[in-house]
């Protein structure tokens, strides 16, 4: 009787582990991408603490993701990856804001 209950418990545990591994692998609810975004946000908030206080307020993080494409540059193409000329124009636009880092 005890052996049969242990066997049922073992089989149920293995099936549950297989089920959750399949759910984690398939990620049907987008949890891993949401967790990646939150982790990135936390990292970007904590990392500047390592810089000296005088430089901290002058740091701006520039991020471009696929949701912001095509880039808002006059004459830029909408293809990805962007053309070299568009890349140069983007860097020139960022440099026009005179970043310190």
Image: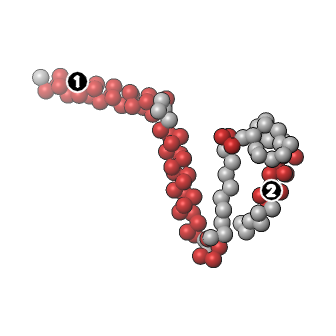
Q: What's the residue at 51%, 42% (across, down)? A: 34
Residue 34 numbered mark, or none: none
Asked whether 57 or 81 is in front, the reply is: 57
Reply above or below: 32 against 8.
Answer: below
Which badge, 2 or 1, is on the more N-terminal residue? 1
* Horizontal arrangement in the rendering, residue 28 relative to residue 12 (left or right): right
Image spot of residue 60 (x, y percent): 66, 62
Reply above or below: 55 against 80.
Answer: below
The quarter holding residue 48 reads bottom right
Image spot of residue 36 (x, y percent): 53, 45
Say whether residue 87 is visible: yes
Say whether residue 84 is visible: no
Asked whether 61 or 6 is in front, the reply is: 61
- Label 1: which residue? 8
Q: Quadrant of the N terminus?
A: top left
Q: What's the residue at 74%, 65% (across, down)? A: 99
Image spot of residue 94 (x, y percent): 77, 58
CA distance separating discs 2 and 1: 65 Å
Q: What's the residue at 81%, 47% (across, down)? A: 73
Around disc 2, counting alpha carbons within 10 Å, would you say few (fewer than 14), some (14 to 19), or many (20 or more)? few
Numbered disc 1: secondary structure: helix
């Amino acid at each position: 009787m005890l052996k049969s209950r242990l066997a049922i418990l073992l089989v149920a545990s293995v099936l549950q582990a297989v089920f959750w591994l399949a759910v984690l692998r398939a990620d049907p609810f987008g949890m891993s991408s949401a967790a990646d975004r939150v982790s990135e946000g936390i990292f970007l908030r904590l990392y500047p603490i390592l810089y000296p206080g005088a430089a901290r307020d002058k740091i701006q993080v520039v991020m471009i993701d696929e949701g912001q494409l095509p880039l808002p540059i006059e004459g830029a193409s909408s293809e990805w990856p962007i053309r070299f000329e568009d890349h140069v124009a983007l860097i020139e636009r960022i440099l026009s804001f005179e970043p310190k880092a």
